[in-house]
Amino acid sequence: MEGFVAQKLHDFENGKISRRRLIETLTLAATTVYAGGAGAAESPGLTAALVNHISYTCADYKKAADWYSKVFGLDQVGATDHDVALPFGKKGEQPYNVAAKDVPLTHLIIRTRDLNAPPAAGGAPRPKSSALIDHVAYTIADFDRDKASADLKAMGVENVRNGGPYSLHMTDAFGYDVQISGLANNALTDG
Amino acid sequence: MERFIAGLVKDFESGKVDRREFCQTVALAAVVYGAGDAANAAPERGLKVIGINHISYTCPDYAKARDFYTSVLGMVSTPGKDNGKRANLMFGPEPGKGGSFIVARTAGTEAKPPSKAVVDHIAYTIANWDEARVRGALKAKGLEVTGRDGSLHVRDPFNYDVQISSAAQENAFRR
């Protein structure tokens, strides 16, 4: 960023760009470089901008959805007789710190279905995976571990326990491991 | 922000700030602006989720998973966090500002209590969706692509189902 600013300042000093252009360019850069995140750069390969959804399958999707709604205050939308979506926000909201307009809110899709059944459209059943998502960690706004722990216990959440200095673990309605943390727990600090 | 930068340019022109200070201040302002949304993230009720922090992915060989997700989905293996058994694969906003990561790890001997639920796939949004470009990029990696336009599926090296989505086709409010 500093190099970019220095270059634009140099251009201004040499009369290559106007004062107005300098201000506009730096304003645009300052408000998009770090806020842009998703979709900011076009590269030849693909770039995951954000998790679109997490597909969670269990024996009773309503029970699981109610648990996630209760604990995380998530609304339930688009319910069918076998699944429901729980977006991380309200309709029209942008994902946190994502400027690109074509990146929707992350959501959970909680389902009840037979994962071993052949696809409805025909074809072979899903191949077995030798990988496992053994837990999902959610970022919580203004995370305070002690307060969150007390809140969770008051809600009757089971197996609430510390997960290092920045996070808590718990188990959901189906015994699935759920972690929560604040922004302080990230790729640079975890592990 | 524009007013702030205009004032800074004025200070630079009048000699109140030097060149170095000018550049550093604009860069710092950009960082502060990027982090500023945290103030808007106050929870309305209970615990407010603002995003996925990380996905813990356990498999027989984390390096194969690391190479797949960095190559196919443009994730970045966090420098200094690859210890030969696990790696943090970053994507989305910057770390600490809402970014997510996959913790790819090689399965150990520790046993977790069994769960009656399963996360059977993860879907990732690709911005600026172009069907031909996305399909072409996946096929160029030698992957078999299934699914429908705007909602594609591939299998990672461990047969885990990976969905690749456009905003138009995969949106909680348009189901």
Image: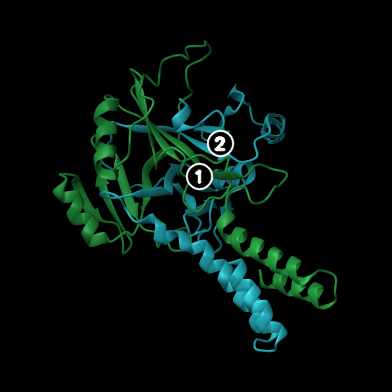
Q: From this viewpoint, is residue A185 visible?
A: no
The C terminus of chain B: image quadrant:
top left
According to the rendering, which colour does chain A have? green
Label 1 or label 2, whichever comes before in sequence order: 1
Of all chains, the one bearing label 2 is B
**How far apart are the alpha carbons under marks 1 and 2?**
9 Å
**In the image, A130: left or right of B110?**
right
The picture places residue A115, in percent across and down from the top left corner, at 40, 21
Towards the viewer: A114 or A182? A182
Asked whether residue A117 is in view, the answer is yes
Q: Which residue lies under the disc numbered 1?
A: B61
* Left or right: A120, with A141 as reference point: right
Query: What letter labels the chain drawn in cyan?
Result: B
Residue at figure coordinates x 26%, y 60% from the top left: A145
Which label belongs to residue B157?
Answer: 2
Give whichever of B87, B10 is nearer the camera: B10
- Residue type indicated by callout 2: Pro
Residue at horizontal 35%, vertical 47%? Answer: B109
Report if the CB atoms under discs 1 and 2 are less than 8 Å apart: yes
Q: Is residue B52 above or below residue A31?
A: above
